[in-house]
Image (cartoon, rainbow, N blue to C red):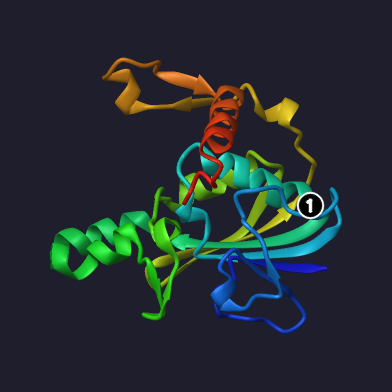
Amino acid sequence: MKLHLGCGTKRLEGWINIDSVEACEPDRVHDITTPLPYEDSTVDEILAEDLLEHFDKYARYVVFYEWARVLRIGGKITVQVPNFKKLLFRYFKFGYDHFVDAVFGENLWESRIYIGYFGNHKWGYSRKTLEEFVQTFGIVAVKTDEIGLNLRLQGVKRKHISWTDLDDIPIYSQANKCGKGEEYVSLKSAREKIQCFQESSQQSFVR
């Protein structure tokens, strides 16, 4: 079983093409911010192109956990995200007008399907931070390529990681440190606050 997450209008033969936007006509309409409808360790391969950057620094842990959870040991995952360091270099070299869309994302998919707030980019990655992030979930980066303005990581799941293993991870916040909050919050605390927000607002936290 192979999952193509956040497929948009790019439907791949032999894959289960999943997207939250019904207008994209995926095989399965599913909000990626909610648990995937598959059992643990039942998926052979996952493809997520231009998707992970649409989740903020806290939500990305909750979302990616689901990807790793359903992937079997030895299963493959390919993640493509914008190369934030390269985007910033282009921004400073060529100017704001040319690259601000690439930095912040686009809400009108293919200039015809409005996907709302989900279209915005909410986090940036370098090769180092992307590889370290997936490793947190028991996934080893086998290869990471720079393709144009993107990073494309191919990884293999080596071990299963539970929430118990993850909940003590400290997440740093420069804004809170210099403001009125804590310098670090645990992933467990962030998860609980995300869940509370979802329940109180009755909507996905990325919408």
Q: Position of residue 134 (x, y in %)?
A: 61, 47
Quadrant hosting residue 7: bottom right
Residue 55 at x, y percent in the picture:
48, 49
Q: Secondary structure at mark 1?
A: helix
How crowded pointer 1 is (Cα within 10 Å; few <14, some 14-19, many 20+) is rated as many
The answer to whether 118 is drawn above or below residue 11 in the figure is: above
Which residue corresponds to the image point at 56% horizontal and 38% vertical from the top-left? 198
Q: Residue at x 62, y 21 (%)?
A: 168
- Residue 106, percent across and down? 35, 66
Residue at point 40% right, 15% down? 182
Question: Quadrant where the N terminus lies?
Answer: bottom right
Residue at the farthest bottom position: 13
Residue under numbered circle 1: 70
What is the x, y in percent for residue 85?
A: 33, 54
| 100 left or right of 171 in image | left
Q: Nearer the viewer, residue 120 or 174?
A: 120
Residue closest to the eye, 89 or 41: 41
Amino acid carrying mark 1 in the image: Val
Looking at the picture, does residue 132 appear above or below residue 26? Answer: above
Is 28 on the left-hand or right-hand side of 84? Answer: right
Residue drawn 49% across and 65% down?
Answer: 50
- Report the number of numbered marks: 1
